[in-house]
Structure formats: C-alpha cells, structure tokens
Amino acid sequence: MSLNQNITISEKYSVISVIKSLFKQRRKQSIAIILLSIIVSFFEMLSISLLIPALEQILDQSTEMNIQLVTYIKKIYSLINVEYTILTLFIGIALIFTFKALINITLATLINKEKLWYEVSRRKKVCDIILYSDWVFINGSMKSYMTNIVTNEIEKDRDVYLKTLDLLPMIFLLVVYVILLVLLSFEITVLIFLIIGGVTLILGRLVKNARYNGSKILRQRNLFMKETLASLDGLKSIKSTSKESFVKNLLYERTRHLSQIRYEMNDRMNKIAYLHEPVNFIPILIIIYISMTYFYVPISVIGIMIYVFLKLSGDLKVIQTEYYRIKFEIPSMNSVDVLINEGSKNVEKDGDTTIEGFNKKIEFKDVSFGYSDSDVLKNISLTINKGDKVVFFGPTGVGKSTIVDMILGLIYPKSGELTIDGIPIENIKKGSWHKILSWMGQDPYLFYGTIEENITWGQKDIQREKLDNACRLACCNDFVNKNGFSYDYIIGDRGSKLSGGQKQRLALARVFLEDPEIVILDEPTSHLDMETKNKLLQNIGKFCEDKTLIMITHDIEIPSFIDTMYVFDKGELKKIDNPNNLREMYS
C-alpha cells in the first residue's frame, strides 16, 4: 500500500480505543496512574468531608451528618493521641490538603514522563520508517504527505495521547464529587444532574461530528502541504514565467478552505467554553432557592454542595471540551499509525553477508525492473570489472539511474540477478557494501550547516590536510577561503547560498574525502563552465586511476579515461567501443 493524501480514517479510532491502547502498551504505568488518581480522589473526598463539620462549628450549627462525621473524626484523633478541637480539626484539614498536593505532584510527574515517552517513541518510529523503509515504498509515497506527518500530524497525535492521560485523574475526581453530592442530599443531586445532562446535550450539539471535521482538516493540510512544497521547489520557474498570480490563487483557496474548517471548529469550542459558566451558574441559584425553601438544607451543607458542584462543573467543562478536541484530532493519530504500520510492512531488505572489499566484478544477469506495469529495464546483462571506468549514456528516463539504484542496493531486480563478486546483492549487508563505494547524485544532498560540515558529513576527526586536498581535487579552492567563504561559512538551507556548480563541487569534495574503492557519479559537471569542467574531469581521472568508476552523463564528449561505454538505444543497452561511434549515433 502506498500512502497518499486521501487516507481513509478508520472507524475504530475513538477515545476508548486510545485508552485501551494506553493500557496495552504501558500496563504498569497505567496502573500506577490509576492508583495515584484513586488516592488523590480519596484525599479530595476526605478534605471536602472535613469542611462540613468545620463550617458548621464556625456557623454554630449541627446536623445529623455533622454528628456522625465528628464521631468518626474524634475516634481517629484518639487513635493518634491528639485532642479534638477546632484548631486540631483545621490542622488536620491543612495536612490532608498538603498530602493531596504532594500526591498530585507525583501523579503529574508520572503523567509527564508518559507524555515524554510517547512523544519520543512516536517520533523515533516515524524517523525509522523514513530512514529504513524500502526505497520503492518511500519514493512511491507522496513526500508531501510524509512531510505533513512529520511537521503537523505528529504534533496532533501527541496531543491526543496527552489529553487522554490528563483526563484519567479528572474522571476519578468526578466520581468522588458525585458520591459526595449524593451523601449530602440525594434530591438536590438529582436536580443537579438533570441540569448537567441538559447542558451536556445542548453543548454537545455544538461540536457534533468533531472527528469528521478533523478528517477534513487532515485532507486539506495534506493538499496544502503538497502544493506548497511543489511551489517552493518550482519557485524559479514560477517567477521566471510570471505565474505568481496563478499559484497565489491556488494557495489562497487552499488556505481559505483549511482556515474556514478550523475556524468553524474553534468557534464551536469557544461557545462551549463561554456558555458553560452561565448555563451552570443560573441553575445553581435556582437549586439554592429550592434547597432552602423546600428541603430545608442547612446553609453549611448548601455551601459545601455549591463548592463541590462548582468543582464538578469546572472539571466536567474541561472533560467535555477536551473530549471533543481529542475526537477532532484522532484522525491525525490514525494517519501517523497508518504510516508506521505500512512502513513496518515495507522495511528495507538487508542481507547477512559482510564484504570487506571489492575484488572482482559487478555483474547483471538478464536483469529486468519496473516501477509499474511497464519495465524500465528489460533483460539487461553487463559486467563491470574491478578497475573499469564505465559511463552510461542516454536520454532521460531510459534506465540509467535505475541501474545505479540497483548497484547502490536501493532496489532489487524483478527478475534476473545482480551479483557483487559472485554474491547476490540481496544477500550483502548494505552497511558493508556502502563503505566500499561513494555516490554523488545529480541533485547533491546538502544541508544547513558549514562548508566543512557538508564535506565531512558522516566522518569524524578529519585532518585539515585531507580536507584541503579533497577541496583542491574538487576545484573548490577557487571559492573556499576566498571572497568571504571559509570552511565555517554557513551555506544555507540545501546550499541556497551557493551556485549550482559550487554545490556539485562540494559534493565531489565529499566523495574525494571518503576515498572509496568504487566511485559512482551522476552528471558530476552539468553546472560547470568548460574550463572548470575540464580541470575537474582530469582530477576525477587521476583520482580514479586505481578505482572503479561508474558515471552517468548526457554529455556526448566522453572523457578520455573512460574505457567502457554503454548507451540506451530503443530500449536496449548497447556497449560502445569507441567514442566516435557514439558521436555518429547522436550526430
């Protein structure tokens, strides 16, 4: 399965499924969170219960509940040999609140550790999928979709898990508040929950289909990311053809649609937040009046019930709001899971044979390969012996890069066999094979960093003498350490501060510094002027005198050090013995 921007959101994803997943993956930690939540809830219940006798003593009132509570409290105080007074009662309440705070800190620390574990482990999994999945799977997937996962959806995925963890302790507190209200007055509690039920139904209507809207935003974000990346990659073409207005309208429309969906959802969330207070406070006034007029509930009990109700109402507001936000963001969790699951099914193959060097030959035996129903390579047979200097010539799209991708071990033949020193490439450990060769692509990989960091990429403790020599061979010395450039010069994002020719030469300096047995170059001089090109080709020839060189080119002027030429002609790979024959074919 290849990923695309129209990913289907599975119906199995829900808040309950997230909680089940939490218990499945982190059973011990989940049990610890629940136990601590129960302990916090117990102390919360105890602290509120003790407020009743304290308040009644202050108001000089006495109820049956107060008498029973004071009896229990006096027994506890006698067990610890402490005299029961209003002062010791207040001290006990203060200690309980302190213990509750300490346990809450422990619980919050544990929850934060779980949040950290989840975020780090998910990001690591996504990185592993990108780095270790099969090349055909990665290259065939929409890069904009994967970019959206890394930059946007992974954050939403984390938020779902974080909010779910935060809700667990609040749910236990809600149970405690309900029990307290029932103990204080069953009749008033029934009234309260009739009101809460009505409020929940009314506000719930405002955020109906939250998950569906989340899926819509996910799709729109993928489309927006796709078109934005395409615009950035093609910015030079856009500006040079004055297509800014056309692209602007396209991006504006995507932005408007994406923002509109997000606005509608946030507007509904705001209504919940701001309507919650009045729709709960007004009924409280009614309940107070009914309690005092018809049920003759003491002021102290009413005060405690109002306190509990306000806490319950606040927590319920948070739970309700966060519940719908979780539903809204669950599609993002689904999209991350799909990437991880599909990537896990397409893990890059690796062999178990370690090779220490290149001794004999690279051999293609009747090899065919295709990315879809049509074959790019058909029944290709060729041999590259150790020390050969080979060039592949031909127009774009005929299979030159596909041959190189096979040699690099990125893809494998659909039929036939490719062997290295007689060993099928599928059986060779990639790490050992890649230590032997070095590849420079047509679009060199450069990153935001210094010139030195880009040349020495992946290598440590490089002596300055070796670095200078690599730069000299790559003809970098005409701009490195000159005109404001130095090894410490920041080259910008993907080498944006360098010209095309300077990028190529830095990438070649990296190859020269690695000093491999096999050198593979794809259009190494396409951005260079004639003088620099000729000088660089001479240096490549000298550097590769005792090495195996494989080069791809569209340039009909083949360097003199090349001893074997292959050309793609009408779907067939032909070996050319003489450069003049190549010129005649394409004259």
Image (cartoon, rainbow, N blue to C red):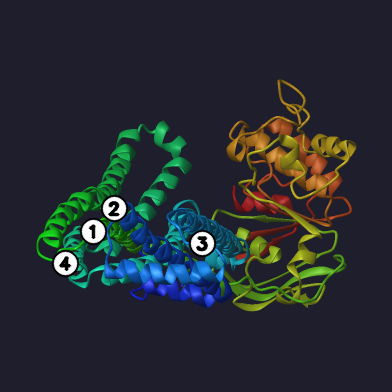
Mark 4 is on which residue type?
Leu
Residue at horizontal 52 percent and vertical 57 percent from the top = 95
Residue at horizontal 14 percent and vertical 59 percent from the top = 292
Identify which residue, 469 or 7, lies in the foreground. Answer: 7
Residue 536 in picture, x, y percent from top left: 77, 38
Mark 3 is on which residue type?
Glu
**Residue 177, quarter of picture:** bottom left
Residue holding disc 1: 302
Instruction: Point out the frontmost of discs 4 and 1.
Output: 1
Q: Residues within 10 Å of mark 4 (few under 14, many from 20)?
A: some
Q: Which of marks 4 and 2 is nearer the N terminus?
A: 2
Q: In this view, does 107 lie to the left or right of 332?
A: right
Q: How many marks?
A: 4
Q: Residues within 10 Å of mark 1 (few under 14, many from 20)?
A: many
Residue 59 tag number: 2
Label 4, label 1: how many angstroms apart (C-alpha)? 14 Å
Instruction: Point out the frontmost of discs 4 and 3.
Output: 3
Residue holding disc 4: 191
Residue 83 tag number: 3
Mark 1 is on which residue type?
Ile
Secondary structure beneath dot 3 equals loop
Secondary structure beneath dot 2 equals helix
Q: Which of marks 1 and 3 is nearer the N terminus?
A: 3
Identify which residue, 163 or 69, lies in the foreground. Answer: 69
Q: Which of marks 1 and 2 is nearer the N terminus?
A: 2
Instruction: Point out the frontmost of discs 3 and 2.
Output: 3
The answer to whether one can see residue 312 in this image is yes
Secondary structure beneath dot 4 equals helix
Label 4, label 2: how many angstroms apart (C-alpha)? 26 Å
Mark 2 is on which residue type?
Leu
Residue 471 tag number: none
